[in-house]
Amino acid sequence: MEEFRKQIIISFMSKAKESTNLRDGLGKVPKVSEIISDSLGLIQCFIAFESFTTGEFNKATAKDNQVEFCSKYKDDIEKIYLSISNEIDKMYNELQNNPLKDMSRRRVPLNFPNKKDFERLFEILYRVRGNIIHGNKEMELPRNILLINSSFKILYGIFSNILINKENISFS
């Protein structure tokens, strides 16, 4: 991986890690709401993730890169599944009766029929991110808070584990 891309990933993952401190009121920053800190963390983590997957796989679309990521790191995601399973369960339960709409385009709403379908999981995480950035979401609704909070914890949990344990990239 080229050094510039690696530094982008380290920078944004460090910022994503700081988002948990913002929520908890740690460090030298005032405490902010959970929805703000998790939204920032999710966006920062996705910037790092997309930089990584573009550099690693160089596919035509973000979705194609996500599919490649899930294929290459499937065993690693399986190994850490237990540590993120509570958040996956929350998302799974929330999307059973009310699929995730696309707030910026007219794409089909996403359901989540299989908790271990990691390609669908990343599609959902990407949609939540897109709804924050491009959509017209009411962020303070309990459902949106749950989806953003769980999305951040899932993506950060998976991606930070793979960066540290498989790619030897530290960002503390």
Image (cartoon, rainbow, N blue to C red):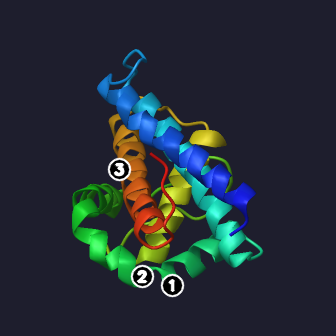
Please tell me whether residue 52 is drawn above or below residue 11 in the rendered image.
below
- Closer to viewer: mark 2 or mark 3: 2
**How crowded is the residue under tag 3: few (<14 C-alpha within 10 Å), some, or many (20+)?**
many
> Which residue is under mark 3?
150
Q: Can residue 114 be seen by looking at this rendering? A: no
State which quadrant residue 132 falls in. top right
Taking the image as drawn, is residue 113 in sight? yes
| Residue 45 pos. (x, y %) | 53, 50
Q: Quadrant of the C terminus?
A: top left
Do residues under tags 2 and 1 come within 8 Å of each other at their CB atoms?
yes
Sort mark 1 into few (<14), some (14-19) or many (20+) by Cα contacts within 10 Å. few
Instruction: Please name the amino acid that badge 2 sits on.
Output: Lys
Image spot of residue 128 (x, y percent): 51, 51
Residue 11 found in image quarter: top right
Three-letter code, disc 1 = Ser
Q: Which mark is residue 154?
A: none
Q: Residue at x 49, y 49 (%)?
A: 171
The residue identified by callout 1 is: 71
Residue pictured at 66% horizontal, 76% vertical: 64
* Residue type at numbered disc 3: Ser
Q: Earlier in the sequence, mark 2 or mark 3?
A: 2
Helix, strand or loop at label 2? It is helix
Separation of disc 2 and disc 1 at Cα? 5 Å
Up the image or down, 15 lies above or below 101; here it is above
Instruction: Tell me the residue that label 2 is attached to.
Output: 74
Element type at marker 3?
A: helix
Q: Position of residue 35 (x, y in %)?
A: 41, 32
